[in-house]
Amino acid sequence: MEFSRDMATNLAFGAPFDPTAADAAKARALAQRRLELAPHAVWRMPANLTWREDPFREPNWVAQYHMLRWLDPLRRQAAAGEDGLIDTWLDIAGSWIRSNPPGRGRARYSWADMVEAARALTLCFALPVLQDLRPDHLPEVLDSLVEHGEWLADPTHIRSGNHALQQHQGLLVLGAVLQRPAWVDLAVERSVDMLRMSYDDEGINEEGALQYHQINYTWWRLLRRRIEVIAGEAPTEFDRILLAPVGMAHATRPDGRYELIGDTEEFSPRALGHPAVDYVSSSGAVGVAPGERVRIYESGYVFGRSSWGDEDTPFADTAFYSLRYGPQDRIHGHADGMALTLYADGGQLLVDSGKYAYDATDPYRAHLLSREAHNSLSVAGHEYDRTAAVGLVESRLGKTNEFFRFEDVGYDGVILTREVIVCLDRGLIVIRDRFDAGAEVAVSQWWHLDPRAGHRTEQDSVFVRGDGNALRLAWVSGQGEVRVTKGTSRPIQGWFSSRWRTIVPTRTVEARAAGCRGELTVAMTFRRSEEPLSIAPVTDQDASDVFRICRGEDIYVATFGEGGGELADWKANQNGADCAVK
């Protein structure tokens, strides 16, 4: 069977197929039957692989194992002159081929979506070295590649999200290397159709996780490059990804890391070659900041900050917040509608709880996906409908104030409304949460704190002392009960995960109200001082739209209404009703 040596050579780029300084050590370890698949520990391979191995009881490890991408250092070192290493490659790859016929592999992940595509690239890129050093083994590998191509051409095997992206890329490379132009055309057609769905007109990816914004952007650029190698140019639809880096910059905290929204770990934007990303990843030393201080993305994100840094306040010392809305069933998204995160004075104050792992059977993973693990509202005893979409029904951006109103109907029979007034210049946020239900319910308002923070509970308020910063939360007296939990297991609450399979206890503040209707109104101040804070309705009515906020000697008025919400200085000579945006 013929194949294109040029394509097998020219398409062999991108992680994990680029040469690295660690190639020799990795190849030597594999020759000694030692395999390390990050972030997992080293595993010593037996002489005879069964392909049922799962030494860490970890789906991620099994998926990586069957991708075979980890074999590529052997290919690269063999091509560089260490001929004998190709025999190790053949021993392992040949064993996999003979043990795992299409659809009848020895593990659940043998022919799983994305896994089969990554493996196809590994086998394709080894063909030139096999042709030079072990040509007798070419037929077995080529036959397997045809099976992979036929599998990926079958539309019933194609999934969604980045897994489908990898499947299209696998079919593209197979078509080019095996000289099957129909496969190339099919892969490009599928990619174009997917691009139209995966990215909106603002350059935001569909997956619901900030880390995957960068990952997908990198993968789509890689696919575009491969299409250009094969066809000379890529379809114009690939230009939809060009706005993505600006969104990544907006999603970056002042510490240069993405906010932990969705399945995101502590992760920094890097190596994207865009001035906005250069700016946030260098703490403003190079690049160009985006123009807007606050950006609302129609796909469900609000990112705001006090500034992008200036002569008086470096970028690293600015304040930042995020809010979430939109569909709650994103591929790598969480049930985080209406959730607020907050960063000020060099550190996190209100955090998203992180992702932990992808194992759907893990109770901690299930918790971190849930509404209770986010700075939002939950209804006790009710299951949240992940097919729901949280609406941003009103927003108003002033010079220093922002107002947002969200509505959530994800709990059957319950309408949740959140109104948020943000004034970063004053170090104040005011939130009014309301619920309306057909029967009595118990609604919890959750605030997840940085794991390094301590706290003390005072009357109608909680003071939080962080690592160089502080936060105080104060509620309207009598609206509900407030308690703080940390690292409990029954029920699971008060946990934070910034890294894969790493989870630590953290304080979580809960305010709870019950009834058919009710509200929880909270004021937050985030200055380093321990000034007392209180909030009270201006009138004695239960559903007041005007609140008086006292912080130390300063007095403010927060007003909620049909025209939005505003925060201003209190002026007694105007009957306490000066609500102009300052």
Image: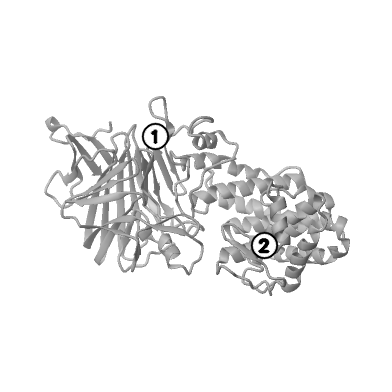
| Lateral position of residue 356 relative to residue 26, left or right | left
| Lateral position of residue 194 relative to residue 95, left or right | left
The residue type indicated by label 2 comes to Arg
Nearest to the observer: residue 418 or residue 550: 550
Element class at badge 1: helix
x and y percentages locating residue 324 in the rendered image:
40, 50
x and y percentages locating residue 160 in the rendered image:
58, 60
Total of numbered circles in the picture?
2
Q: Which residue is mark 1?
A: 317
Mark 1 and mark 2 lie on one chain; the one further toward the N terminus is 2
Residue most toward the top? 311
Nearest to the observer: residue 495 or residue 119: 495
Say which residue appears at 43% left-offset and 58% top-offset.
503
* Residue 292 at least partly seen: yes
Q: Is residue 420 above or below residue 443?
A: above
| Lateral position of residue 277 relative to residue 75, left or right | left
Q: Is residue 172 above or below residue 241?
A: below
